[in-house]
């Protein structure tokens, strides 16, 4: 949980390889996938925190892939990468569970910034879960009674 | 094609509008004129026939009465008694009491000797045995003469009646005052020119004719006399002056005289001529009214059709333009989307090169040099140009992929000042006077407030640019107005006194990528986006401008409710 693990999903392989190199130079480990199914496969094999997902891909498109990812790995933060300038596709992605969106052509700094934000969110969420689990384990029956009496 | 087409239409409408009512008018007038003429003619003829017959009866009665007067004297007195002049005087006086038309009275024996006489002449002793009247009395018992001069050299006529007494016939004869008789015969008054007179069997005047024609002169009209005792006859004949007369003639019963009643045709048919005059006047006036009305109405109809055609054409052009814009938008959006992918790669590559370069520099693998500086500058330029491309593709996508408007009811009286407040500072910086002309009775409109704001800001910014380019920072004026157009639409206009738009640019102003701004300053999509937005809200946007005077953009939106 100390190091952010990202995965880039896009059908443009050159984009993937260049961005991977760039991010590697900045000290980030990045996995890549060229399609939705491949991304799901990678998710099964690796513990990935943030996925940057292109909306428009041949075969399974970004929205479908997003739904699959959120269903199977609800803890994974997904950032949509869209070629559309309008909010429409972004809104659709956000409604389906994406954390944020980016517009093509996007800056590497922007991409990284949003990814880190998402990672922070993920970390906070995991922290909350941990605290909640602790409370459940250490909570007294009186606390439970008090909680139910409250209107 | 246009002009000729309307010309043909105009001719058809005109001929229908003139032809039909004119045919109707003329047929109604001529039918009624025909029947009216007919009825007037028969009524006039019937009336003149009635007059002539009544008059004849009156004259007949007069003659019969005079005859009866004499017959009564014959029965009442003996020849001997009447031969006594004194007795005759008394009888004549009684006779005159009854009818003052008697001028004299004479008594004749069977030999035709005038034995006694009362009157202004000295006729006693004259013998009339060979005179026609005497012979006729001897034969028929009575006689009414034509008018003649006789011994007296004065026109007169006589009535003689004979009686058998003791195997001998004796006769009394009275002269009738032609003046009085004339008066009776003439006493017919119809219209102005109606007159009555008598002709004998030879066509000689037996009474005077009022319009000229002396007693005992031949009738200058030389009427063709009808057969004796035939019935009443009417006919038309011209007199010597060419004047047409309506005649009615009938034979008297008591004497072989023809009673003629005549009236000038123009007088007899005066009502008819008035009617003719009126009919003509109505025809001419009615015709003129029909023709004028036809020309007026045809002009209006044709111009109305012309206007409708022009409107139709304009509407068609608008539709074509709108659909062309929509197609273009779709295409541009697809195109922009595809460009974004390679742009993304270029950007990544550029970032990688930059990263490698800075790593190399840090590691000391590269020395500062002019070439390196140029390389870095070039990389920076690539980054800049990618940004520029990105801006363009984003504008195109905005234009092509209009999101559905979220319509709500907006009160423009509050909304417009809110929008203009955003640019009021910019306006004051450029010395532009910002004027509101917002009608208080503007109804609510149904529109997307965010999108409408985008449109207005676009128009206002364009107006600023136009004003600044003409006036610099002084003398600009920008008006934003709102007013109801009709019960269903509201107009918003943005009017500037900027540099204006030339007519050829005016046509292309809503086309995508059309711009007059310098390269890199405008994408040429602003107004086409505005067009798309207003169109999607069910409104229209129009522009009017004169180069060097200013421009007015007018948005028409549907009123709420």
Image (spheres, grey):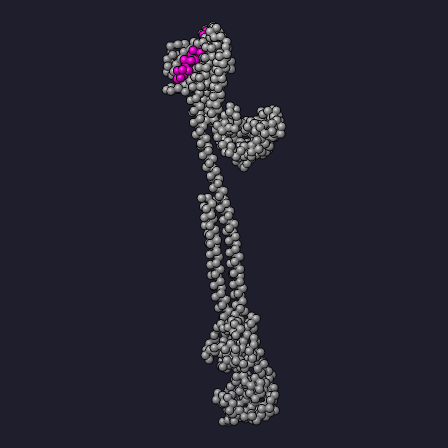
Q: Residue at x 52, y 63 (%)?
A: B276
Q: Where is residue B311 in the image (x, y as percent from the top left)?
A: 48, 39
Q: Where is residue B137 in the image (x, y as percent from the top left)?
A: 50, 88
Along the line of sight, which residue is nearer the eye, B288 or B207?
A: B288
Which quadrant is home to the N terminus of chain A? top left
Count of marks overlaid on the render:
0
Q: Which residue is drawn at 38% across and 12% down?
A: A42
Taking the image as drawn, is residue B465 in sight? Answer: yes
Q: Residue at x 46, y 23 (%)?
A: B393
Q: What stretch is highlighted in magenta?
A: A2-23
Taking the image as drawn, is residue A133 in sight? Answer: no
Q: Measured along the vertical axis of the image, is residue B155 above or below residue A151?
A: below
Q: Residue at x 44, y 26 (%)?
A: B332
| Residue A18 among those drawn in magenta | yes
Q: Where is residue B308 in the image (x, y as percent from the top left)?
A: 48, 42
| Residue B98 among those drawn in magenta | no
Along the line of sight, which residue is nearer the eye, B441 or A40?
A: A40
Q: Which residue lies furthest to the front in this view?
A: B370
């Amino acid at each position: 949980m100390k190091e952010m693990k990202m995965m880039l999903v896009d059908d443009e392989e050159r984009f993937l390889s260049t961005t991977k190199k760039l991010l590697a130079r900045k000290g980030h480990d990045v996995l890549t996938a060229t399609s939705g199914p491949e991304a799901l496969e990678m998710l099964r094999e690796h513990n990935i925190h943030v996925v940057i997902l292109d909306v428009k891909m041949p075969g399974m498109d970004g929205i479908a892939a997003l739904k699959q990812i959120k269903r199977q790995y609800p803890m994974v933060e997904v950032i949509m990468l869209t070629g559309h300038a309008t909010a429409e596709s972004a809104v659709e992605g956000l409604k389906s569970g994406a954390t944020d969106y980016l517009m093509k052509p996007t800056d590497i700094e922007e991409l990284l910034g949003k990814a880190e934000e998402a990672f922070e969110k993920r970390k906070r969420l995991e922290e909350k879960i941990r605290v909640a689990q602790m409370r459940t384990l250490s909570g007294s029956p009186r606390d439970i009674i008090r909680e139910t009496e409250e209107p | 094609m246009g002009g000729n087409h309307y010309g043909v239409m105009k001719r058809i409408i005109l001929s229908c509008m003139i032809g039909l009512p004119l045919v109707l008018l003329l047929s109604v007038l001529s039918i009624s004129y025909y029947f009216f003429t007919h009825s007037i003619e028969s009524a006039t003829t019937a009336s003149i026939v009635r007059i002539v017959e009544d008059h004849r009866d009156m004259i007949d009665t007069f003659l019969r009465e005079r005859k009866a007067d004499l017959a009564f004297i014959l029965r009442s007195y003996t020849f001997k008694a009447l031969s006594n002049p004194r007795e005759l005087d008394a009888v004549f006086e009684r006779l005159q009491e009854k009818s003052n038309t008697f001028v004299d009275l004479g008594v004749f024996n069977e030999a035709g000797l005038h034995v006694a006489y009362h009157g202004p002449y000295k006729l006693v002793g004259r013998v009339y045995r060979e005179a026609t009247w005497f012979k006729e009395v001897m034969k028929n018992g009575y006689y009414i003469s034509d008018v003649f001069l006789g011994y007296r050299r004065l026109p007169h006529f006589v009535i003689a009646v004979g009686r058998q007494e003791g195997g001998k016939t004796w006769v009394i004869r009275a002269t009738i005052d032609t003046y009085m008789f004339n008066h009776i015969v003439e006493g017919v008054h119809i219209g102005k020119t109606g007159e009555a007179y008598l002709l004998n069997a030879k066509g000689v005047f037996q009474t005077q004719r009022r319009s000229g024609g002396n007693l005992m002169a031949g009738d200058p009209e030389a009427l063709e006399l009808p057969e004796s005792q035939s019935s009443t006859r009417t006919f038309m004949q011209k007199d010597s002056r060419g004047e047409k007369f309506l005649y009615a003639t009938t034979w008297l019963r008591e004497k072989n005289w023809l009673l003629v009643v005549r009236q000038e045709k123009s007088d007899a048919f005066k009502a008819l001529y008035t009617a003719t005059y009126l009919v003509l006047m109505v025809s001419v006036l009615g015709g003129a009214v029909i023709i004028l009305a036809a020309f007026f109405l045809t002009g209006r109809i044709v111009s109305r059709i012309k206007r409708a055609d022009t409107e139709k054409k304009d509407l068609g052009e608008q539709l074509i333009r709108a659909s062309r814009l929509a197609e273009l938008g779709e295409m541009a959006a697809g195109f922009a989307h595809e460009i974004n992918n390679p742009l993304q790669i270029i950007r990544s590559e550029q970032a990688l090169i930059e990263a490698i370069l800075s790593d190399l520099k840090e590691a000391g693998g590269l020395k500062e040099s002019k070439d390196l500086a140029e390389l870095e500058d070039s990389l920076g330029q690539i980054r800049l140009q990618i940004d520029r491309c990105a801006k363009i593709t984003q504008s195109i996508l905005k234009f092509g992929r209009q999101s559905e408007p979220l319509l709500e009811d907006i009160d423009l009286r509050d909304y417009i000042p809110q929008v203009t407040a955003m640019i009021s500072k910019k306006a004051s910086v450029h010395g532009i006077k910002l004027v509101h002309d917002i009608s208080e009775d503007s109804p609510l409109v149904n529109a997307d407030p965010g999108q409408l704001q985008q449109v207005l800001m676009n128009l206002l910014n364009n107006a600023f640019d136009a004003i600044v380019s003409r006036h610099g920072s002084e003398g600009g004026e920008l008006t934003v107005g709102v007013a109801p157009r009709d019960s269903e639409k509201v107009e918003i206009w943005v009017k500037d006194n900027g540099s204006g738009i030339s007519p050829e640019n005016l046509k292309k102003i809503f086309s995508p990528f059309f711009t007059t701004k310098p390269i890199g300053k405008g994408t040429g999509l602003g107004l086409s986006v505005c067009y798309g937005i207003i169109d999607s809200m069910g409104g229209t946007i129009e522009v009017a401008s004169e180069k060097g005077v200013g421009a007015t953009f007018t948005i028409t939106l549907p009123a709420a409710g």
